[in-house]
Amino acid sequence: MARSLNSEKTSPDHLTLKLNAPGMTAMHRAGLGGLAATLARLTICRNNGEAPCTTSDPLWHDEYDWSISPIELSLRFGKPEWAGDFMEWLFKYAFQIRDEMIFLPGQYGNTLPPPEVRARLQEGIMLTFLQNGKSRELGPEVVGSYEYDQHMVSYKFSTCISYATHQSAWIDWVDKKTGRLIPKSYKVSAMLNPGAVVRHYAFKGPTTIYQSLELVFPLVFAIVGTLALPINYETGVLIIPYIDDLITFARLRRELTPSGIKDTNIGGIGDAVLQHNLRCMGSESMEVYSLPGCDAIRFQRKSWSKQQKTRSDILSITSIIDSEFYAAALKYFPPYLRKIENAKNSDAVEENKFQWLNGIIRPFIADNIVRGRCWFAGFTKLMKGNDTVSRILFERKRLNKMVTDEQLDWKMEGARSLVIAVHQALRCRYGQISSESVPGSAKNRMEKEYDRWRIAFAGSKTQEQFRYSLCDLFSRAKTGSELKEHWEQILRLLQCDWLAARDLALIGLASYKGRSSESPEEDATSSDEN
């Protein structure tokens, strides 16, 4: 068993890093997993006789070696004075730049994702690890394009010249004269462990984090072991997988990286976690091995800290979540392309441009699932704001398809029946309005009818108020078949959990889709139905 570098009787011709060493957090373990994945890719290159880097130097050195077990990893330099050369060789392979973008071999398999996917991954890294301008050097912005679903979609990224915080981290660890490792504590910056920042400049001494090389080394590779994705240009999510077996994770890491552009589009922190879960469950390695849960951290700019993006939300998932319902939500509410109206090129000529959108419902469902709530919990809040209501109406067709899917298990008795009963009541009310109205006036009356029930349901403060509003709707319409057949379950739901019933009634209102003449508002026309 190797002793710590802080010991005077150390063995500096090799370095052993332990998964469960004192001070190892989830971020440290993910970093050690990233190092294991990088070494696994190096092993494949060595076995295939391939050069480890895109450049001809350095090539293989017979004295350099490593070994990976489930709970520890050992690096062997050959001689103590070769430690610096080994680190330079390893880091040159681990932290590359290819096609003017950050390239981390430990995250990929034999097939690289297309450039537009790697551009999104780099954007996620820039919003988390490398958000500080001192941590990287960027060049001019590059615009590219790709074809998706018969549409030409453009993307852009800032060319990366260097990211010295990671590429050159080893320099401070090595004595320049002897080439040996220096046994001391090293400063941990936010570029290595996002969120680990000095709390206040006036107290930077007491709040600065220093750790031994055995702990700092894994943090440098956390950028490889974790997964960073952008939500938008200002917000990023960092997924930190829990690791209890380095060999398993080294096999699995490449499968956690999104392979298609659609998979890089997330709408929130819960959305990112559940897509990560689906990739875990769909991997070949998961058939034999199991992977625990993960931490997910959202980084965004706050009014009290405009200089940097700070942790605004944290999720800790102890085990992989049953994502059956989320998989259905992803099926009905996938990321979609929408045409940018009045888009013009540099010559002021109008052209067809498309952008990816995630909608509002899938991220809402995902956040509920990861927090252990019913998928519809809190839908009332969405139906109170004019902005969110318009976004929900844009996805009405998709929501209707999901709630009418009889194969989905709602995990609450009477929940789906209440939604369908509201559908039937609305259909009857719109039919009555249509038959009573003079030509041209039905649409306005239907819009008022829709707003009437939305305000009545969403504005109910007590069980009695909501029950009165719902019964008022049912009484004004002819009794539907769903209400006749399942009135006992619906009544029990109203008595036991009226807040859930209120959410469900509003889902019924938002997801109702009849003939165009019966709808309070036309569905948006775009490629969202693709």
Image: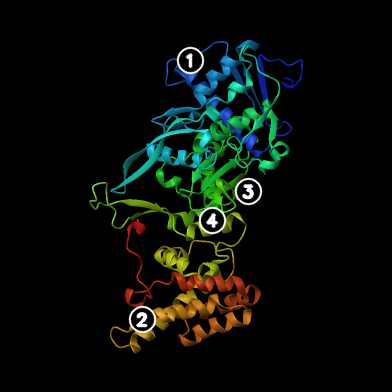
Judged by depth in the image, the label closer to the viewer, 3 or 2, is 2
In the figure, 337 relative to 276: above or below? Answer: below
* Residue 300 shows in the view: yes
Q: Which residue is mark 3?
A: 317
Q: Which residue is mark 4?
A: 366
The residue type indicated by label 1 comes to Pro
Sequence-first disc among 3 and 4: 3
Q: Position of residue 342 (x, y in %)?
A: 28, 57
Verify CB contact (< 8 Å) between mark 4 and mark 1: no
The Cα–Cα distance between marks 2 and 1, rounded to whole angstroms, is 74 Å
In the figure, 392 relative to 94: above or below? Answer: below
Q: Position of residue 69 (x, y in %)?
A: 64, 26
Verify CB contact (< 8 Å) between mark 4 and mark 2: no
Q: Which residue is mark 1?
A: 58
Label 3 packing within 10 angstroms: few (<14), some (14-19), many (20+): some
The image quadrant where one finds the C terminus is bottom left
Q: Position of residue 401 (x, y in %)?
A: 42, 64
The residue type indicated by label 2 comes to Asn
